[in-house]
Each structure stands twice: as C-alpha cells, then as structure tokens.
Amino acid sequence: MAENRAAGSWASLYKGHIAAWEQRFADACSACGVDGAVVFSGPVKYRHRDDVEYPFFAEPYFKAWVPQAYAGSAVRIVPGETPLLAYRRDEDFWHMPAPEPEGFWTDRFEIRCVSNGKALLEELDGVSRLAGIGEGARDEMGFASVNDPNLLTHLDYQRAFKTPYEVACMEEASAVAALGHAATQRALSREPSEFELNDIYCRASGQRESTLPYPNIVALNEHAGILHYQNLDQQAPEHFRTFLLDAGGGHNGYASDITRTRTSPDDPFAHLIASMDTMQRQLCTEARPGTSFVSLNERAHQLLAEVLAEHRITRCAADESYERGITRAFLPHGLGHLLGLQVHDAGGRLESPDGAEQAPPAEHPFLRLTRTLEPGFVVTIEPGLYFIPALLEDLGQRSEGRMVDWERVAQLLPYGGIRVEDNVLVTGTGNRNLSRPALKRAGIA
C-alpha cells in the first residue's frame, strides 16, 4: 500500500522518476532545437473585479518535478545540470507564506527562494536558448519559444508511460478516495442529501473542495443520468433510489478517478448494477498491452448490448442491438481516458511524439483515448448505462426504437443511470487494478 512506504522508498522511486523525466525533456528539447526548458507553476488568479483568489492548480509539467504546489514559481531544466527550483515565498501578513521545500525530493534540486516575480526572473538568468512552458511564460521574457506545441506534444506523448513513482502516487490517491467512497456508502442508511454526501466524502478523505482533483459528481436518483452533474441539492429526495458518486483523490500532484453506483439491497435495480459491475470487471481484465482502446471501447458496447437484453430493456438479440447502434443511446461517452498529472491526462489521441493523432470513430466522438495500450499506461475503465430523456427520445423516433421495451425504460428512468469506474495500470503481462484493492481495504468493493 503506497501510504505505508518508508521515506527511503519514496526517495528511491523519485530518483528513478526524475531520471526518466530528465531524459524525456532532453529528447523533447533536442527535437525542438532548444537547450532546455523553464516550467512555470502558474500565477494566482482572482475573480473578475474582486480580490478573492481562485483555487490554485499548478501546471502539470511543474507537478511532474515538484510534489509541492508553489504558485508563481518555476523549475529550470537543462540536460546534464541539476534542476533549479526557484520558489516564491512572499512575506506578508495577509496570508500564510509557502512552506519551505522539504522531504524525499529536495536533494534532487538546487533550490532558491524568491520574494517576487522580478527576483524569480533574475534567478532564471540566461533563457535565450530555453523553452518557456506554462501560463507564466511570456515572449517578452526572452525565451527561445513559449509553449511550443511541438515541444508539448513530445512531452504529452511520453507522459502516458507512468514511472513506478507515479504509479505509487496514484495508488495513494486511490487510497485517499476510497476513504470518502466508503464513508458515503455507510451514510446511505439515513438517506442524506447530495450536499451532505459531498461533505461526508471530503471530510472522510481529508480533502477540501478546493483541492479535489476534479469537482465531485454526487448524484441521487435521476441526477445519475446527467454525466457531469454539478449541483448539490441540500434537500434529500422523497424516495431514495440511486446514488452515483464519481470522486477522486490526489497525492503529490497525481490523481485518482473512481465511480460507484448504489441502491437499496432489496431494490430490483441492484441486479442491473451487479450486471454492470460484472461487465466492468471483464473490461478491466481485457485492458492489456497491445490492445487498441478503440477496440476495447467497441467491446464495451458489445457487452452492454448483452446487459440490455438480459434485463429486458431491449427486445432484440444482443448482436443486433450492438450492430444497429442502440447501445450508444444508453452509453454516450467513451470507455475511459488516460489518468495521471491531470484527471483527463493529455496525449490520449497521439500516435507518436511528432503530433500525429488518431481521431475517435465517428460513432464514438467523445472517446478521449484512441491509442494502443502499452505497459505503464494508467487508464480509467468506466462503462455506464444511463436513462437520458433526450437520447431516449431521439432513439424512440428512429426505426431502432421498436426494439426497445419502453415500458421497462419508463420504470428505470427515475433511477438515472449506472457508472462503475476503476483505475487500471497496464503491465508487461496484463494489468493491475489500482482502485479496487484500496476500496476493499476501506471496507467496500
């Protein structure tokens, strides 16, 4: 379990991680004709016409090097030299100053503290042959390039291959999320509101809303059919039917992304959830090296067609339901995406470091990942089955609509939908589920 690793183990993992990222930056910079790069963490932002700050989220390539978040800071990376971290620590009486860097990672850097933006640029002297990366990089600073798409594409392609350190961080992020998932499931017996469930999740996982890797999707009943449901009703529904929680955790800048759907044990809808859980487990086992994720996405629709037939939602054979595209009305999103420094990690459609892309199939336009799986990839596997009025209305107006049992659909519509999501590491011989073991340790499946 990641959180039980000794400091020495983390230091060893991080040493290998930085060696890998040094090579990635060296290759990318060489390909783009620069000597190195300066990665800015990003500035603090304020609400329009206000003095209240937005939550700060660092540039992903800053997080790849620095586990702690420092706004207004930068890392200077030149192959063959010790990386320089210039971190900003403003001394004032309005806010707590940024903590001094400490921990297993600091001996890999030359570290300098600066008190303002001008001092930061002075520490980064000599950037005319360096690339600037991040929101804080600007042309007038004298960089050879600023956010060069070719340079970023090289890095985006390579970051799909996770280092052992990154995998350990994501295991820890799963453990963080699992605590929240378990706490919300235990609270269901008293039928709390979405607002209460969100608070329970944050408290149990030790996360503030402003530090979550993405806004929690806390959906009761028909809200489970809204893919990115964003509201938190403070009033509990009159009748509890379904609870869908899509919520993750973070550790050292890396994310987890986990979804579970629950209903009352004696509700017949539980059988449909169980079928989707079985289907999702099967897809997880098939996320193996050499497998096209486009093909795995098609496999999800083939299996979903079987679930629809088994539960009498469709009136035709499963293969006909799949071939005629009926499943797409019940599962409109892609099967999953890359996961890591960002929840929807970059590079999911890249075929090579030079920027060539594979577009998703026309019938699955929202598929975020089209690459062939390789060892080191961490992906989400998240099939769903939703009862979305607009999509069902469209299906009903097509000839395929006669193959659907609309009376059965009407019974299921108040439940909203189902999604089951795990984070899966592709290994040299198969795969390893990063989230289910964490959930099991927390007392749930």
Image: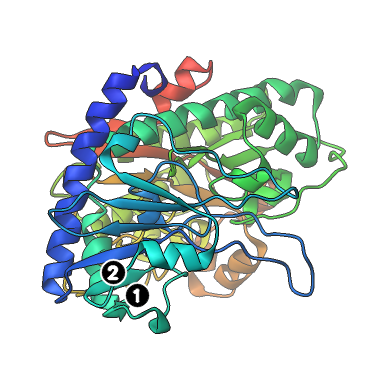
- 442 over 41 or under it: above or below: above
Depth check, mark 1 against mark 2: the one in front is 1
From the image, tell me which residue sits under label 2.
Answer: 152
Give the Cα distance between marks 1 and 2. 7 Å
Crowd rating for badge 2 (residues with CA inside 10 Å; few <14, some 14–19, many 20+): many
Residue that mark 1 sits on: 147
Q: Is 262 placed left or right of 5 in the picture?
A: right
Under tag 1, what secondary structure? loop
Residue contact between numbered discs 1 and 2, judged by CB atoms under 8 Å: yes
Kindly indicate the quadrant of the structure image that contains residue 48: bottom right
Q: Locate residue 71, reporting x and y percent.
A: 53, 55
Regarding mark 2 in the picture, which secondary structure is present there? helix
Query: At 79% across and 74% down in the image, what residue appears?
Result: 49
- Residue drawn 57% across and 24% down? 179
Residue 15, how many percent across, how many down?
22, 35
Would residue 412 be visible to someone looking at this image? no
Q: Earlier in the sequence, mark 1 or mark 2?
A: 1
Q: How is the image coloured?
A: rainbow
Residues 426 and 44: in front is 44
User: Is 258 drawn above or below residue 95 in the view shown?
Assistant: above
The residue located at (28%, 62%) in the rendering is: 156
Crowdedness of circle 1 by 10 Å Cα count: few (<14), some, many (20+)? some
Q: Give x and y (percent) for residue 37.
A: 27, 65
Residue 418 on image: x %, y %: 56, 43
Query: Residue flagged by tag 2: what amino acid is it?
Result: Leu
Disc number for residue 293: none
| Amino acid at pointer 1 | Asn
Q: Nearer the viewer, residue 200 or 86?
A: 86
Q: Nearer the viewer, residue 226 or 388?
A: 226
